[in-house]
Amino acid sequence: VIVEPPCACDPSQFLDIAGIVDTAKSPANHDNAAAGFAPDSLAHVSTNREIELPCGRLFVNELSVDSSLATLTIRVPGRTALFVDGDVHALGVINLELGPDAELDVFVRGNFVLAGIQAAGNSTKPAALRVYVGGSEGILLSGITAFTGNLYAPRATVTVAGIQDIYGAVFAGNFNAGGIANVHYDRAIVDKGRDC
């Protein structure tokens, strides 16, 4: 009996996230100018802040919340791709709020280090949020009762703490759950992108 590999798990088959971000870095390949969106728009947030991302391809140097008392709420009403040249790093809280027709792809060249998330994605459409992480530093999902989205971090260890449910999928170098973690796979992720 020959059993096919469950996924593209060999390092030579990993998605080239750094290459994707490099391509998006060119002004010809992103919509920052048309949207009036600066590459440092999401860097070093130190107070509570709300921002709505327009439709299109947006490039930022980093996404960081520097204060443990700050909350950054990112609202996405339509289809948006966000390319992060460095890390996503938050001492405070990041909320990712997707509208009913929204889809968000986040490509992170570096690491994805979060102290807390209050909301992530749309619970009725887990396949609408897709996060791709190129770095190898551990990813901690904690502080929420559910994570809704698809996380692709083939070189990192994903640790789940205090989360009861994951709606979507996790592709990681390693996975640790400190307690009960129910994963509800959304088959719609298989077809995403075909209509673009």
Image (cartoon, grey):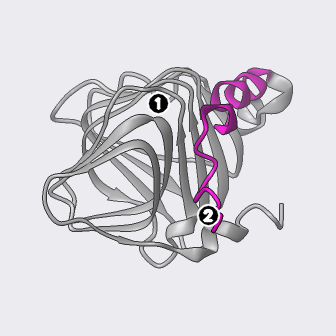
Q: Look at the image and tell me in which quarter the C terminus lies.
A: bottom right
Q: Look at the image and tell me in which quarter the N terminus lies.
A: bottom right
Q: Is residue 7 above or below residue 41?
A: below
Query: Is residue 149 shown left or right of residue 165?
Result: right
Indicate the position of residue 91 as horizontal and vertical percent values.
23, 30
Query: Is residue 164 shown left or right of residue 32?
Result: left
Residue at position x 21%, y 61% in the image: 163
Which image quadrant is residue 177 in? bottom left
**Disc 1 and disc 2: Cα gap in Å?**
45 Å
Tag 1's secondary structure?
A: loop
Tag 2's secondary structure?
A: loop
Query: Is residue 185 inside the magenta stretch?
Result: no
Residue closest to the eye, 79 or 108: 108
Residue named by callout 1:
42
Residue named by callout 2:
3
What stretch of residues is rendered in magenta?
Answer: 1-26
Residue closest to the eye, 189 or 8: 8
